[in-house]
Image (cartoon, grey):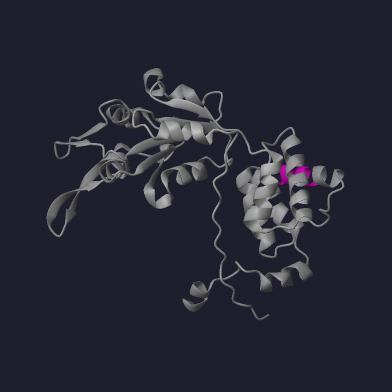
Amino acid sequence: MNKKTKTRRQYTSPFIDHDGIRPIVEAYYAQPDFNVLLVGDPGIGKTTFVSELAGGPERMVTVIGSKMMPNDLIGRMTLVNGETRFQDGLLTKSMREGLTCYIDELSGLDDACQRILYGVIDHRRELTINANSETIVAHEDFRLIASDNFSPSGAATLNRPFRDRFVHVYMNRLDRDTEHKLMIDQYGLEDADAEWLLAVAAVTRRANNSVGATTRQLELCSLAIASGVPRKVAAQHTLLGSIAGNSRQQFEQLVQLVRAEGLDLDEVWLSKQEMDQFDDLEFVRSEESTNSR
């Protein structure tokens, strides 16, 4: 079967205002004395929100709290051409260059990393590097903003003095009309496909044992549909499969719930006809990957 070479589409998410919080967060963000903590469910667009706030991903350094060690934030001594030099960490780099340091999963930071941030997020805006006895004063454009997911125990790993240095802004899931507009305006879906996809998402969100489809998953599904994947297949792969994880039982339960609503989800796996359609998908293979083989 001859494969057709297609060029991958590029999509960027628009800046969407969640419940009118944009002007509030912008007001805090404009002042170096405020450190914003965005709190909300996974997949609702917190990272995209911060990226747009910072002026684009090139103006932002992302730190994953649960994966950070102190040296990842501060930096370390390295040997370059026989000479020992200090290599900036993620936090140090953003402070020097006036970037936005975005800490995702703030509650995942261990005590050692939290202690490093104390002088950075209070009025001093300083970081002392013991390795080379240097004290960095943050660039005037440096900002620190963090996010975390709703969790009954999430705040327990952050001590009170540390938490008190942030203003807590709560983000809700986008409303149905906004998600509908996003799928049509950003991904070019037909209205019927957008309505069908939202109906499937609503079923997953009502399921007792499921957190439901996130906006991130809806965007991924919209991209797949816009690229030519049959909508029922895209929904199985990007919504139901992602929600169920590696639990086949939960996946089949979600499929049954969707079918019970009268939505078209007859085939769980790809048919031969649908497999053939993948020859025409725009994201199957890029020019670069084809030429590199």
Horizontal side of residue 157 vs 19, given as left or right: left
* In front of the other: 270 or 26: 26
The extreme left residue here reads 83
Taking the magenta stretch, the answer to whether it contains residue 36 is no
Q: Main secondary structure of the magenta part?
A: helix
Place of residue 140 in the rendered image (x, y in percent of width and height, measured from the top left) = 28, 38
Place of residue 19 in the rendered image (x, y in percent of width and height, measured from the top left) = 60, 33
Horizontal side of residue 29 vs 212, given as left or right: left
- Residue 226 to residue 182: above or below: below
- Residue 186 to residue 208: above or below: below
The answer to whether residue 238 of the structure is visible from this angle is no
Place of residue 165 in the rendered image (x, y in percent of width and height, measured from the top left) = 38, 23
Question: What is the total number of numbered labels drawn onto the structure image?
Answer: 0
Place of residue 64 in the rendered image (x, y in percent of width and height, measured from the top left) = 42, 41
Location of residue 21 by image quarter: top right
The extreme top residue here reads 160
* In front of the other: 192 or 24: 24
Location of residue 279 by image quarter: bottom right
**Magenta segment, which residues?**
247-255
